[in-house]
Each structure stands twice: as C-alpha cells, then as structure tokens.
C-alpha cells in the first residue's frame, strides 16, 4: 500500500473517531427516567405545554420561540418556516409539547400562529465554524407536519435537558445557540434568531424545562 493511501486512510480514521466523539450522548442524571415518564401526561405519550430556556450565557432564562419575521419555504413538500429563536419574554409561541414516539420525541408548538407545527432539521443547511473548535449549522425549522428528521433524543443531565438529533445528516448533533448573536425588538420584547445545531454538547446545549404559564 502506498504512503499516500496510508495517509488518506489514517486521516479518514481520525475524522471518524473525532466525529464519533462529538456525537457521544451526555450522561443522564439519576432522575432521567422519571423525567421522561413525566412527559406523558396526555394520552400516555404527550406532555402538557412546557417552556425551554438556556441555562447559561446572556440568553440565560430566555425562551425557545419563533420570530415574527419567520421565513416560509418548503422541505420535501412540507410547509416550513425558518426562524426558531430565543425571546426574553414568554408568549403563546414559547410553549412546546413533547410527544413520545418509537423514533424519539417530537417537539410541537403548543400555541401561537404555528400551533401544532413541529421542530425539524433541514439537511440542506450549511455548517459554519463557531469559534476555533466548534462547528454549528442553522438547520432547525418549524414544519407543518413531521418529516424524516423531526425526532429527538432527550437526555436529562445535571446541567439541564439536552436535545439530540436521531436521524439525517446531522444525526448526533445537539441543540445550541449563538451566544454572541445580536437581538432585536419585536412587539415589546427582545428576540434573537440564533437557535442552532452543534456537533457536540457545549454550554449552550443545556435547557431548563418548566410548565408553560397559561
């Protein structure tokens, strides 16, 4: 075998090993199973509305939401919008439901204009560096119905809930957000269109889950 081929194989092995390390799920806390069970309050597989909030950075305590400036498009024939965001004040659009399926959990909007829509991944989204040692992709969309890549593995850790993609090009990637991204005013609150997928668990991958206020 030529030196060139040996080098190529070595590089491929290193890349595969690195990728596998990035895709490793975080360790679950002792109460993980009880937490997952608690998300089956409706018909045995659906949670009551919850909010999701980062536990670190200047966006600590903000809420996963959808911007009023969401851009419509299509994904494999399904209506989707691009604009999953963080908002500093909760509204109807800050409420989400977890639906347990054989493939993982769906995350479904529980209120607002897009009530009933689910968070999915668009494999066409391009990756970009986020600092010197992390790659992210703005691949999250809100879809009118589930797609092939709309299921999530939920892991309750000591730091908070981690959401991990279970399929597609970005399988094994985790929810994150751009910590230094700018925000803007929308109807009296601050909104940052910066929710992403990251290739490994980072500080922005941990979320607090609380009952949504009625």
Image (spheres, helix red, strand yellow):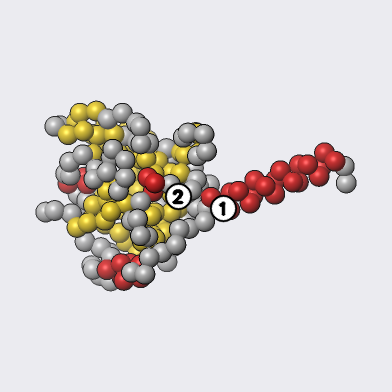
Residue under label 2, please give it.
201
Residue occupying the point 23% across, 68% down: 41
Return the x and y of residue 68 as percentages of the image width and height.
23, 34
Determine the residue located farthest toward the right in the rendered image. 1
Local crowd size for mark 1, using a 10 Å CA cut-off: few (<14), some (14–19), many (≥20): few
Q: CA distance from mark 2 to mark 1?
A: 10 Å
The quadrant in which residue 44 appears is: bottom left
Residue occupying the point 27% across, 48% down: 53
Local crowd size for mark 2, using a 10 Å CA cut-off: few (<14), some (14–19), many (≥20): many
Return the x and y of residue 77 as percentages of the image width and height.
42, 43
Residue under label 1, please give it.
21
Q: Is residue 82 above or below residue 12?
A: above
Are the residues flagged by discs 2 and 1 in contact, CB closer than 8 Å?
no
Q: Is residue 182 visible?
A: yes
Circle 1 SS class: helix
Q: Is residue 3 left or right of residue 46?
A: right
- Give me the disc on residue 97: none
Which of the two labelled residues, at mark 2 and mark 1, occupies the earlier sequence position? 1
Q: Is residue 14 above or below residue 39?
A: above
Quadrant that contains the C terminus: bottom left
Q: Is residue 45 above or below residue 54?
A: below
Q: Is residue 23 left or right of residue 8?
A: left
Q: Is residue 75 visible?
A: no
The quadrant in which residue 32 appears is: bottom left
Residue occupying the point 52% across, 56% down: 24
Circle 2 SS class: loop
Residue occupying the point 47% across, 39% down: 136
């Amino acid at each position: 075998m030529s030196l060139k081929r040996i080098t190529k194989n070595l590089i491929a092995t290193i890349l595969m090993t690195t990728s596998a390390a990035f895709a490793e799920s975080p360790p679950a806390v002792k109460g993980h199973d009880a937490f997952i069970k608690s998300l089956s309050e409706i018909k045995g597989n659906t949670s009551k509305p919850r909010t999701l909030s980062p536990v670190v950075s200047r966006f600590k305590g903000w809420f996963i939401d959808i911007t009023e400036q969401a851009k419509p498009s299509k994904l494999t024939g399904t209506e989707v919008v691009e604009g999953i965001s963080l908002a500093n004040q909760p509204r109807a659009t800050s409420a989400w439901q977890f639906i347990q399926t054989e493939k993982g959990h769906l995350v479904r909007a529980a209120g607002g204009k897009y009530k009933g829509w689910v968070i999915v991944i668009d494999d066409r989204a391009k990756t970009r560096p986020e600092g010197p040692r992390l790659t992210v992709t703005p691949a999250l969309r809100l879809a009118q119905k589930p797609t092939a890549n709309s299921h999530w593995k939920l892991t309750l850790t000591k730091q908070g809930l981690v959401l991990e993609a279970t399929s597609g090009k970005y399988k094994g990637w985790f929810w994150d957000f751009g910590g230094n991204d700018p925000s803007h005013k929308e109807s009296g609150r601050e909104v940052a269109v910066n929710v992403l997928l990251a290739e490994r668990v980072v500080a922005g991958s941990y979320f607090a889950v609380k009952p949504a206020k009625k």
